[in-house]
Amino acid sequence: MKIASFDVDAQNGFTRNAPQELPVPEGDEIAFDLNTMAKRADLRLGSKDAHPANAAWVVADPANMLQPLQLANADLTWVSHCVPGTLGFELLPGLPAPIDYDYFGAFVECMILSTTPECPIVPDIEAITARKNHVDDHQQ
């Protein structure tokens, strides 16, 4: 049995590093703990939240957040956050680059768009382990 550590959306957009987005108190202080947990795991997985700047659910004022919407793939309004190319989209300082994880993806986006084998709801841990073992064997 393999143990996986999963860094879920550990991005600046959820910290005081990007206060105009969705800051969580002390959210910028979790990198050390995530790294500590990852040392106890066989695999490290990661994900990022990602949204276009012009998403239909974006509101300019945080006071207008969490208002109901009647859209197919969005039920509430939010301020713009985790837009690719912005500080909010970037992983927290102290975390590995996405390429240094055993698997890195955007599972939430997959769940909204598709549940086909090409875009699974959850990662295939056996496939990730096989891929990691293959790479490890070739690095020795």
Image: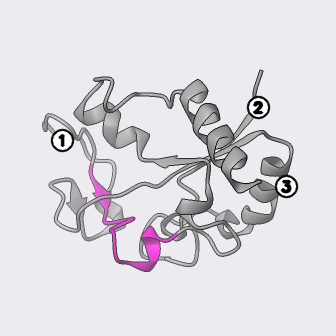
**Residue 113, percent from left and from top:** 23, 35
What is the span of residues highlighted in magenta in the rendered image? 77-90
* Marker disc for residue 119: none
User: Is 82 in the magenta?
Assistant: yes
Query: Most prominent secondary structure in the magenta stretch?
Result: loop
Which of 139/110 is in front? 139
Residue in the picture at 38% in, 28% down: 120
Residue in the picture at 61% in, 54% down: 101
Q: Which is more N-terminal, label 3 or label 1?
A: 3
**Secondary structure beneath disc 1?**
loop
**Residue 91, percent from left and from top:** 55, 67
Q: Which is more N-terminal, label 2 or label 1?
A: 2
Disc 3 marks a residue whose amino acid type is: Thr
Q: Which is more N-terminal, label 3 or label 2?
A: 2
Disc 2 designates what residue?
3
Vertical placement of residue 25 versus 9, above or below: below
* Marker disc for residue 36: 3
Of badges 1 and 3, the one in the foreground is 3
Dot 3, how many residues are within 10 Å of its Cα: few (below 14), some (14-19), or many (20+)?
A: few
Disc 1 designates what residue?
69
Disc 2 marks a residue whose amino acid type is: Ile
Disc 1 marks a residue whose amino acid type is: Leu
Residue in the picture at 49% in, 77% down: 18
Cα distance between the residues tagged 2 and 3: 14 Å
**Secondary structure beneath disc 3?**
helix
**Residue 105, percent from left and from top:** 45, 47
**Secondary structure beneath disc 2?**
loop
